[in-house]
């Protein structure tokens, strides 16, 4: 019996699928990968049975993977069956994959699952594989892998971050960088004052509600959110800032004078929301990223926590935030 089923396109995803099968098998997992091209004009019964028995369904998203092929498309059929059977689905985004404005309706739910992006070969076993395993079902194979490899410390640090409250996450913080579509977090004065009371520097970046980026967000990313709410979020945050200045809330006014709380707006299109928490002890720093997919609501976004130990990704999102913060399209509020 196989516990993991790997689904892939042979034209662009085949090589990576073979590598993934080999590495997972070496790590002690029981993996099914269709080497034989066994389909002969029907959705093979062995494939159906194997998906039914597996705990996890890994789907490799590669170049043009959602483009329909003539005849019976077994890649679509496998994904559709996994969704129908409520399998634990883990998408793997290859470097060749490009987000598409639409995904076939019968398999669109595959984009709601939290996935893993392809890493450079030297990081495959040290970063990619532990991250992938963290999304798999809790099985003896997974527990053995975590016990027998260095993945245990990495996974536990990521899981610890996911369970932390904001108050704990901000403990010993020196800077919080936030990049978001909505200014809703500013409306919670407790969060802001709590951080400022601890001497934390805050950089808050939001999308200009009158920009084309905001219109795109309404059209594709937040289909169930009214534009008026998007505008309200921004206006309410600005009004709150003024009220806090006028009321001279403790810590807040002096923090603004000291430049410890900076707010900017941008007209750039954002692919994700970012919250970076930089700690006094650098190794305790982390990034929370919300990835938005087309034709899904905000509630269906994919969120991941990235510890400082995942240094390549941590640095990538820090640089991305700095790029947007300092861009010509970004201005002070």
Image (cartoon, rainbow, N blue to C red):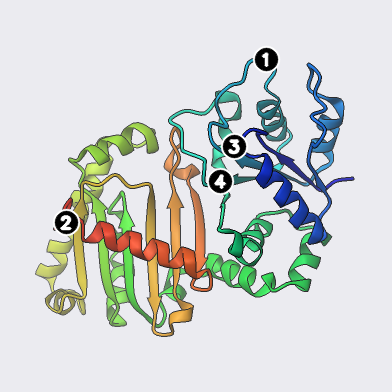
Are the residues flagged by discs 4 and 3 in contact, CB closer than 8 Å?
A: no
Question: Where does residue 15 sit, x and y in percent of width and height?
Answer: 67, 44
**Mark 4 residue crowding within 10 angstroms, few (<14) / some (14–19) / many (20+):** some
Among the two numbered marks 1 and 4 on one chain, the one whose residue lies closer to the N terminus:
1
Q: Are marks 1 and 3 in contact (CB under 8 Å)?
A: no
Residue that appears at 74% across and 57% down? 23
Q: CA distance from mark 1 to mark 4?
A: 25 Å
Task: Kindly report the distance in space between the C-alpha atoms of the residues bearing marks 1 and 3.
Answer: 22 Å
Q: Which of the two marks, 4 or 3, is nearer to us in this view?
A: 4
**Residue 114 relative to residue 318: left or right:** right
Q: CA distance from mark 1 to mark 2?
A: 56 Å
- Per the image, label 2 sits on a secondary structure element best described as helix
Residue 89 visible to the viewer: no
Q: Which residue is mark 2?
A: 238
Quarter the C terminus occupies: bottom left
Give the Cα separation between the discs numbered 4 and 3. 12 Å
**Disc ID at residue 93:** 4
What residue is drawn where x is 84% and y is 37%? 50
Q: Which residue was labeled with disc 1?
A: 71
């Amino acid at each position: 019996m196989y516990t993991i089923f790997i689904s892939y396109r042979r034209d662009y995803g085949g090589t990576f699928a073979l590598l993934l099968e080999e590495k997972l098998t070496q790590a002690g997992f029981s993996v099914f990968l269709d080497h034989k091209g066994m389909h002969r004009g029907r959705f093979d019964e062995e494939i159906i049975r194997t998906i039914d028995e597996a705990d996890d369904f890994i789907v490799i998203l590669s170049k043009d993977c959602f483009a329909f092929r003539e005849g019976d498309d077994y890649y679509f059929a496998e994904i559709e069956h996994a969704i129908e059977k409520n399998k634990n689905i883990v998408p793997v985004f290859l470097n060749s994959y490009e987000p598409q404005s639409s995904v076939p309706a019968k398999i669109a739910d595959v984009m709601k699952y939290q996935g893993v992006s392809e890493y450079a070969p030297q990081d495959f076993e040290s970063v990619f594989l532990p991250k992938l395993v963290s999304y798999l079902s809790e099985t003896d194979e997974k527990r053995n892998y975590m016990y027998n490899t260095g993945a245990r410390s990495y996974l536990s640090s990521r899981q610890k971050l996911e369970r932390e409250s904001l108050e704990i996450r901000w403990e010993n913080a020196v800077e919080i960088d936030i990049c978001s579509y909505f200014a809703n977090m500013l409306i919670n004065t407790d969060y802001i004052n709590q951080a400022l009371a601890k001497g934390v520097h805050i950089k808050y970046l939001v999308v200009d509600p009158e920009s084309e980026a905001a219109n795109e967000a309404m059209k594709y990313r937040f289909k169930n959110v009214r534009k008026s709410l998007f505008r309200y979020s921004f206006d309410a945050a600005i009004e709150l800032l003024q009220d806090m200045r006028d009321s001279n809330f403790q810590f807040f006014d002096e923090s603004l004078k000291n430049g410890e709380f900076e707010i900017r707006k941008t007209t750039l299109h954002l692919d994700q929301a970012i919250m970076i928490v930089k700690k006094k002890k650098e190794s305790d720093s982390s990034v929370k990223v919300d990835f938005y997919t087309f034709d899904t609501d905000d509630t269906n976004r994919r969120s991941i926590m990235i510890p400082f130990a995942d240094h390549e990704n941590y640095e990538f999102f820090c640089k991305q935030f700095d790029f947007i913060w300092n861009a010509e399209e970004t201005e002070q509020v």
